[in-house]
Structures are given as C-alpha cells and as structure tokens.
Amino acid sequence: MNAPSSNPPISSQHGAGQIVVTQVRSAIGAKPKARGALRALGLGKIGRSHTLPDRPEIRGMLRKVSHLITVEDVAGGNAAGEDVTDQEVSNAETA
C-alpha cells in the first residue's frame, strides 16, 4: 500500500481559473514519465514556478508529479491551506 502524500488531494473542481505550480523536489531518480510531466508543465529546476490554466489534462500531469511540486490557486490562495510567504508570492509573480 502506498504511503500517504504530504500534499492534499488535487480537487475535482475544474474551473477556468489559473494555478501556480512550483517544483520543490528534484526529479533525479524519478521515473521517466514523471520527468516528462515536469517538462510539459514548464518545470525542471527546484524553485521554478509556472502559471497554468486549471484544466483536466493539466490536473492529470499534476497528479503524476504531486510528490515533487506544490500547487496554489491564483485567485483562491494556497491550495494546501498554508500561509503563503512573501518570497513565494514574488516567485509566482516572476514566473
């Protein structure tokens, strides 16, 4: 049985909004499909953020690499329910 992930489950509400995805762990040692999903999401280095549309195909890629990333709603704040630091906000704005 798989160990529970520290990230919350990705919601099933697919709106027309935007989400900010930030890579927080390395892809070294990850399966090739997970590395490919990171590249397709516009990631590849730890700390890199990318704003993406909230669509089912994007959510599928996020689910594939949920152990390597954090996900935030642009309008709704942090999807994890944690406080967003000033540095995270500036990283999201520069991406």
Image: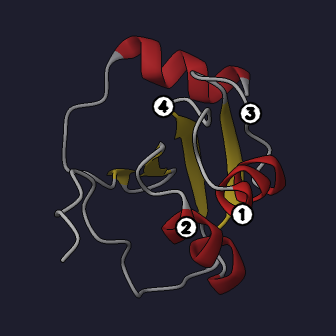
| Vertical arrangement, residue 32 with respect to residue 86, above or below | below
Q: Earlier in the sequence, mark 2 or mark 3?
A: 3
Q: Nearer the viewer, mark 1 or mark 3?
A: 1
User: Residue at coordinates 47% horizontally, 54% vertically from top-left?
Assistant: 75
Location of mark 1 (residue):
33
Q: Quick one: label 2, few (<14), some, or many (20+) residues within 10 Å? A: some
Q: Earlier in the sequence, mark 1 or mark 2?
A: 1
Q: Are marks 1 and 4 in contact (CB under 8 Å)?
A: no
Q: Amino acid at mark 2?
A: Lys
User: Residue at coordinates 58% horizontally, 20% vertically from top-left?
Assistant: 91
Location of mark 4 (residue):
25
Badge 2 marks a residue whose secondary structure is helix
Rounded to the nearest angstrom, the CA distance separating label 2 from label 3 is 15 Å
Rounded to the nearest angstrom, the CA distance separating label 2 from label 4 is 14 Å
Q: Amino acid at mark 3?
A: Gly
Along the line of sight, the residue nearer the viewer: 80 or 75: 80
The image position of residue 2, as x and y in percent, is: 23, 71
Q: Amino acid at mark 4?
A: Arg
Q: Are marks 1 and 2 in contact (CB under 8 Å)?
A: yes
| Vertical arrangement, residue 86 with respect to residue 38, above or below | above
Q: Are marks 2 and 4 in contact (CB under 8 Å)?
A: no
Location of mark 2 (residue):
64
Residue 9 image-quadrant placement: bottom left
